[in-house]
Each structure stands twice: as structure tokens, then as C-alpha cells.
Amino acid sequence: MMKFLVRTVANAVALAVAVWLLDDITLTGGSTGGKALTLLLVALVFGVVNAIVKPVVRLLSLPLFVLTLGLFTLVVNALMLLLTSWLSDVLDLSFHVHGFWTAVLGGLIISIVSWAMNVMLADDRS
């Protein structure tokens, strides 16, 4: 359970950094506490998308991963971020990603920050 919470908080921080750095990734409305709650909910959606949809997409696009020596990961991450944006809209969360190239850059930022947060918050007791 603790590992799940750490990953969710890491994803929320990574999403917040992407919102802060990129103008075309927006989190609108509400107070600071409301935005923090929205970020946590979007992080949960993002985690579910990455846990359920991403493995299927990676398996189906395996030849492209091999052909591009792994660079296709950027496209898959962008698609997962766009799917999260769409699901957030369906769930009436105020998180939006505008455009594919913004999603590519946002996916890269989220991957780097999430990795760094997981390293810093990792529990050595596994």
C-alpha cells in the first residue's frame, strides 16, 4: 500500500511540474487545495492508464520499439498523457493537454520527474 501511495504522490508532483513548465498543459479553477486534490485524482487516473493500457500498447507496438531502438516510448508516453487528459475531461477534472507535441514534451518531463521522485521517496524495505 505504501508503494502505491509513493507512486501516486510522485506522479502528482511530476504532473504539477509539467503543468508549471508547459503552457499547453493546464490545471484550471479552484483554490490551491482544490488544485492539489485534482492533481492527486489525475495522478490516480494516470496510474490506472499506465497500469492497464500502456502494457497492451507496448506489446502491440513492439516492432516499432525495436525499429526505433526504444524512441517510440516517447510516443507511447504522449498517447498515455493524452488519454489521461481525455479521461480527466470525462471525469470533470480540470486537467487538459493541448496538442500532441506538448504531450510528447510533457510525457518526457513527467517521466524524468517521476523517476527522480521515486528514487528519492523509495523505501529500501521493498
Image (cartoon, helix red, strand yellow):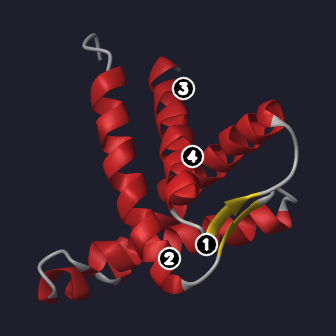
| Residue type at tag 3 | Leu
Q: Can I make out residue 105 in this image? A: yes
Q: Which residue is mark 2?
A: 102
Residue nearest the viewer, comparing 32 with 58:
32
How far apart are labels 3 and 4 at the CA level?
16 Å
Q: What is the quadrant of the C terminus in the image?
A: top left
Q: Which residue is mark 3?
A: 5
Mark 3 vs mark 1: in front: 1
Does residue 13 sit above or below 26 in this rendering? Answer: above
Secondary element at tag 4: helix
Residues marked 3 and 4 touching at CB (< 8 Å): no
Q: Which mark is residue 16?
A: 4
How far apart are labels 2 and 3 at the CA level?
27 Å
| Residue type at tag 2 | Thr
Give how far across and how far down residue 123 sits, in percent. 32, 15
Q: Residues within 10 Å of mark 4 (few under 14, many from 20)?
A: many
Viewed as shown, does residue 105 lie left or right of 32? left
| Residue type at tag 1 | Asp
Does residue 104 sit above or below 40 in this rendering? Answer: below
Does residue 46 sit above or below 99 in this rendering? Answer: above
How far apart are labels 2 and 1 at the CA level?
7 Å
Q: Residues within 10 Å of mark 3 (few under 14, many from 20)?
A: few
Q: Which residue is mark 1?
A: 24
Which is nearer the N-term, disc 2 or disc 3?
Answer: 3
Which is nearer the N-term, disc 3 or disc 4?
Answer: 3
Which is nearer the N-term, disc 3 or disc 1?
Answer: 3
How far apart are labels 4 and 2 at the CA level?
15 Å
